[in-house]
Every structure is written in structure tokens, then in C-alpha cells.
């Protein structure tokens, strides 16, 4: 506990006025501050349990840790196995309130990008307000914020009336396929609730906390080009044509020149081509053979595409198909797309929810949160329910270096985020559906 003292002192010196809060809301704020050491103990425990998406036993272990936190708060917790898609499963927890307020869906995830063979495995306190570790922010810091908020609501007596469903996926970093199966329970929860709150990381700009009401999609594409093989002296000729590699280069260069538009990115992550070219089953490694005097008959490229709306996704895909279909002489090509994470478009109802959060900020004496550019967020699970209900992204912790060794969480954002979340949930629970 002694290691938390510098953080507690720092927070005490920086605590804003709570003049705008009700009595129970002031109790929420006080409870969050008092339980800060407990939150860091939980964070260290979660981080030190490896839960890479492919470490099924590790993901289940983190699920058990979260069950131990939620059941004492009155949640009915169940584990949903996902062996059919090659993943550990999801934790789903429900809290029955008085049936009158807004039904809330809280979203987080148990897994990280760091598998057991990663050299980055342990929680390390760096200074008074920072610690590093695998998943320290993404998303184990978010899980700690969620627990801290719910415990504060219980202490203040506001949890009892709240109807809350929690879905903690076990494969957010590497979703099991088909997605229709691996996100089935999340979508079902979205259909049964009124508002979604995502406990992934808090975005900041220039030291200012930002609000997120949109996330872009994330999907993959493959282009396979073919050509007539033969001696290189015949390249460009009427009999030989241009070969598969020139055809693939044409396609990729036309993508670069013809596709750009706002909120769209499309990356090329892997290219192989030659006399032979293959990708492994996971499509993350390639092998090719060839000689300088052989016209290559095959070339393959794989990349991703990220859009802000379904309409943009379909329109850009149509452009890509058109480009791929304009072949150089003597060549052919086909493009295929995998099942994407959908986009979360910036709907007016999402902005209204951020406005509600900014009222909480005002009453806490915190600065208003501006709108984050969707280009500055990756894809996430909340997008699967974005067309079903309004949502807000980024109720977790601030951090830097996510998804890489040295991922560092800003511990000072845990109490700030927990207070915001708990008071927002308290107020939503009192609104008529």
C-alpha cells in the first residue's frame, strides 16, 4: 500500500470542487478516492496474469478474477465458452435494478496482444503516476475503472436501482471467426439495453481528456494477380504480357492515387510474388521463389481498410473492385474481403451522450471534453452494437505505447474516469426509458 501514497497525495492536491454533485454523487467521488490503493492491487494482479488472445487458459483466469469482483456487487455472472471459434470465451454479467431507468451495457475485454512467448509479462510501477505492463491500459486499466465505478455506486446506494449488463470479450484483440458467432452474445446484449459505455482507453490531446463518439471499421483485403509465365525477354510482348507483379503494382498504385477521401485509410501489409507465391493459413507470412529471367505468374498483396460508415465501406470496396478489374495485357487479378469489424458512425445520439458526460465533468469541476477525431482511434467491440443504441467510447485509462513492450498506464486517470463513469451511470439509471 505504501507505494500508492505519492499518487494519493498528488490526487488530494489536485482534487477539483464537487459543488455541483448531489449527496450520493459526493459519496461516489469520496469512495473512488478512498479505494485507489485497492484498485492498483487489482490492476497489478490482472496485468501479471498473461491473457494473450490465444492463451485460452489465461483469458479464463482473468475472467475468474473479474467474476470475483462482480458477484459481491450483486451481478449474476456467466461464462460463455467460444471453443467453436478457437477462443476462450466471454464473461457476461447482469445486475437487475428497478426496471425503470436506462438499461446500460458496459463493454471491455479480458485479452491482450501479448501472448505467453512475449518478453513483456509483468507489472512495474515507474513513478508516482505511471506503471507499465502488458495490457496495463488496454484493457486491464479499463476493467479497474469499471470495478471502481461500480463499487463506488454500491457504497453510495445508487447501484441498487441500476439495470446493467457487462460483456467482457475474451478475443477483442484477435476476434474469433466467424464474427457472427464470436460477437453473438455482445449483439444480444445490445438489443436488450438502451445505451453502451465502452471502457477502452481514454484519449488525450495536449493533456486534455477527449470524448469519443465514433470508431472506424477494420477489415482486410487480399489481391491475387496472375500472369503468363515465360522467358523474361518476352515481357510486355503480345504473347507474354506484363506478368503478375506488374499487374499487382498497377493495382496498388491505383489504390494509392484513386481512393483517398476523409476518414478512410487502407494499408498494404504484406506482398509476395514470383514464379511461386503463397501465404500461410493465418495470412501473416508469405513465401515466394523466382528468377530475374522468369516472368512471374503469381503475386499476392494483403492489407486492411478502415472506414467511418457502412456506406463508405461499400463505396470504397466497389472502387477497389473496379480498379482490380482493369487488367494489363496478359494478366488477371481478383480481390477478396474478409469479415470486418463494423464502424461506429458519429451519430447525434452519441454526441448527446457525450453532452451528458460533460455535465458530469462540470459538476465534478473538470474541464469539458472535446470531440476526438475518429482517425485517432482503432476499431473496437462497441461498434457491433452501434446501430442498436447510442454509445460512448473511452471510459478507460489514458496511456501511451499500447500494443508494444513498455505499454504504460497513467494511474492518475483511474479515479477521474471512475468518478465520471459512476456518476453518469447513476444519472442514466434515473432517467425514464
Image (spheres, helix red, strand yellow):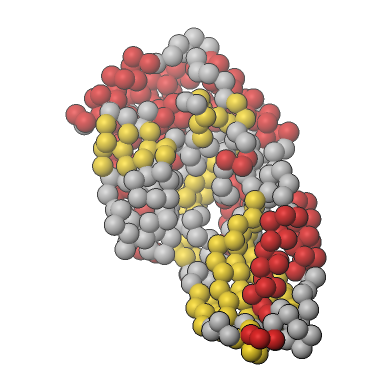
Q: Quadrant of the C terminus?
A: top right
Percent of width and height locating residue 175:
53, 61
Residue 164 appears anywhere in the view: no
Percent of width and height locating residue 292:
55, 82
Residue 288 appears anywhere in the view: yes
Residue positioned 42% across, 21% down in the render = 29
Residues 408 and 11: in front is 408
User: Relative to 21, is 234 on the left or the right?
Assistant: right
User: Relative to 119, is 377 on the left or the right?
Assistant: right
Residue positioned 31% across, 20% down in the render = 10
Residue positioned 64% across, 47% down in the render = 216
Residues 283 and 60: in front is 283
Name which quarter of the figure residue 313 lies in.
bottom right
Percent of width and height locating residue 70:
41, 43
Percent of width and height locating residue 344:
66, 45
Q: Furthest residue to the left? A: 2
Q: Quadrant of the N terminus?
A: top left
Residue positioned 47% across, 19% down in the render = 24
Up-down: is 259 above or below 24?
Answer: below
Amino acid at each position: 500500500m505504501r507505494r500508492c501514497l505519492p499518487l494519493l497525495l498528488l490526487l488530494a492536491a489536485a482534487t477539483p470542487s464537487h459543488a455541483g454533485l448531489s449527496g450520493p454523487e459526493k459519496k461516489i467521488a469520496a469512495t473512488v478516492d478512498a479505494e485507489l490503493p485497492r484498485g492498483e492491487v487489482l490492476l497489478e494482479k490482472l496485468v501479471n496474469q498473461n491473457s494473450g488472445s490465444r492463451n485460452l487458459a489465461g483469458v479464463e483466469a482473468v475472467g475468474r478474477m473479474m467474476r470475483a469482483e462482480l458477484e459481491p456487487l450483486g451481478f449474476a455472472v456467466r461464462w460463455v465458452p467460444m471453443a467453436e471459434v478457437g477462443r476462450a470465451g466471454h464473461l457476461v454479467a447482469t445486475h437487475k435494478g428497478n426496471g425503470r431507468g436506462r438499461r446500460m451495457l458496459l463493454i471491455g475485454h479480458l485479452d491482450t496482444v501479448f501472448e505467453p512467448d512475449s518478453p513483456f509479462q509483468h507489472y512495474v510501477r515507474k513513478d508516482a503516476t505511471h506503471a507499465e505492463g502488458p495490457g496495463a491500459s488496454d484493457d486491464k486499466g479499463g476493467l479497474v475503472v469499471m470495478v471502481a465505478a461500480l463499487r463506488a455506486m454500491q457504497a453510495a446506494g445508487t447501484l441498487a436501482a441500476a439495470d446493467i449488463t457487462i460483456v467482457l470479450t475474451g478475443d477483442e484483440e484477435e476476434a474469433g471467426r466467424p464474427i457472427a458467432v464470436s460477437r453473438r452474445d455482445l449483439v444480444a446484449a445490445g438489443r436488450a439495453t438502451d445505451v453502451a459505455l465502452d471502457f477502452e482507453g481514454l484519449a488525450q490531446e495536449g493533456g486534455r481528456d477527449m470524448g469519443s463518439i465514433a470508431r472506424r471499421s477494420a477489415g482486410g483485403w487480399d489481391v491475387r494477380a496472375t500472369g503468363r509465365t515465360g522467358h523474361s525477354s518476352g515481357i510486355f510482348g503480345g504473347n507474354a504480357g506484363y506478368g503478375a507483379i506488374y499487374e499487382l503494382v498497377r493495382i496498388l498504385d491505383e489504390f494509392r492515387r484513386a481512393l483517398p477521401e476523409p476518414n478512410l485509410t487502407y494499408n498494404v501489409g504484406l506482398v509476395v510474388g514470383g514464379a511461386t507465391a503463397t501465404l500461410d493459413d493465418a495470412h501473416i507470412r508469405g513465401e515466394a521463389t523466382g528468377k530475374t529471367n522468369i516472368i512471374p505468374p503469381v503475386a499476392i498483396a494483403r492489407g486492411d481498410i478502415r472506414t467511418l460508415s457502412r456506406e463508405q465501406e461499400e463505396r470504397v470496396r466497389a472502387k477497389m473492385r473496379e480498379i482490380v478489374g482493369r487488367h494489363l495485357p496478359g494478366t488477371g487479378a481478383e480481390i477478396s474481403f474478409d469479415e470486418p469489424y463494423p464502424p461506429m458512425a458519429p451519430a447525434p445520439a452519441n454526441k448527446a451522450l457525450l453532452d451528458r458526460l460533460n455535465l458530469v465533468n462540470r459538476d465534478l469541476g473538470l474541464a469539458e471534453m472535446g470531440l476526438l477525431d475518429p482517425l485517432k482511434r482503432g476499431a473496437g467491440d462497441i461498434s457491433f452494437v452501434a446501430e442498436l443504441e447510442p454509445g460512448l467510447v473511452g471510459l478507460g485509462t489514458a496511456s501511451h505505447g499500447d500494443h508494444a513492450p513498455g505499454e504504460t498506464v497513467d494511474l492518475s486517470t483511474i479515479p477521474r474516469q471512475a468518478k465520471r463513469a459512476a456518476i453518469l451511470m447513476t444519472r442514466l439509471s434515473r432517467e425514464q426509458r
